[in-house]
Amino acid sequence: MKLKLIAATFSLSLVACVNTQETSQSQPNPVISPAPVMISSTNVQSLQTKTKVITLEQIMADPDWFGRAPESWYWGDDSNTVYYKQKQLGNPLRDLWVKKLDHGSKVQQVTMSNLHKVADNRAKINQDKSLELYTFEGNVFVKNLANKSVKQMTYTSVNETDVQFLTNGNIAYRVDNVFYSHDLITGQVIELANLQMTEKPKETQAPESYLAKEQHKLINYIALQQRNDKLQAQHTATLADQNNTVTSTKYYFGQDNRVSHASLSPSRR
């Protein structure tokens, strides 16, 4: 009896030891939390600034976001020089720069006093390829391609456009709806065509109705003015017909019309 009790007690002790070991092995390892990191308000603002998204409004408000790449480039007269424009930093103005293709040459800015000499990127060339014709700031210039000399042909406050060489060697240009011919040798300017968007003036008409005739008789002053106007119109027409120094180049297209496009024939016809 005593032996059975001792065996039972030993068996119970082994079971208890096994259960204790299993219990300790089944418990998970304790989780170690990371230490808290303190971030100052300055660092937070710096992180927010670095991750800030650039909006389309910001880009359009400051063109410098697009960069200042060269633009509107063109070749020089010697085909060994390139001109281009570049936006100034912080404002919309453009400067003109020149770069020769020779090895080692540096880029130089064209001074404002010389801009008219190189503003010939859209120039017209005459038949023997000796002269160039172009405009700068509304005035007309001619460049001799052999010696690179530049001659200013007009010096006015109006805007001369549509420059071209005529078949007789002269140049032509347009001011609004008026076309002019300019002699390169004598400097004489001739009006070639004047486009009028009005009705052609009519000659003074004699009164037709009875009431008009009676008023015409009674009011001698009106009759005299009409007579003088008619005589002046006849005199002007006769003078233009018989004297080649007087021009009469007006062309009437009627009211409520406008010129959408007009060009001058090189032969002036």
Image (spheres, rainbow, N blue to C red):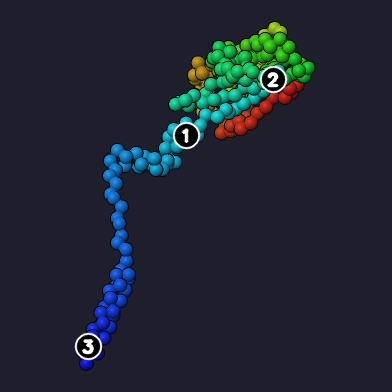
Residue 102, position in %: x, y?
68, 18
* Residue drawn at point x = 62 percent, y = 20 percent: 99
Relative to 104, does residue 13 appear above or below in the rendering? Answer: below
Q: Amino acid at mark 2?
A: Asn
| Mark carried by residue 80 | 2
- Amino acid type assigned to the residue bearing label 1 in the image: Trp
* Side of 223 where 17 appears, left or right: left
| Dot 3: element | helix
Q: Position of residue 78 (x, y in %)?
A: 71, 18
On the rendered structure, is 164 left or right of 198? right
Q: Nearer the viewer, residue 118 or 231?
A: 118
The mark nearer the N terminus, 3 or 1, is 3
Cα distance, mark 1 to mark 2? Answer: 32 Å
Q: Residue 107 or 181: which is nearer the viewer?
A: 107
Residue carrying label 1: 65
* Pointer 3 residue: 5
- As helix, strand or loop, the secondary structure at mark 1 comes to helix
Quadrant in which the C terminus appears: top right
Q: Is there a contact, CB below 8 Å, between mark 3 and mark 2?
A: no
Q: Quadrant of residue 123?
A: top right
For the residue pair 263 and 96, the one nearer the viewer reads as: 96
Q: Is residue 73 visible?
A: yes
Residue 242 visible within the image: no
Nearer-N-terminus badge (3/2): 3
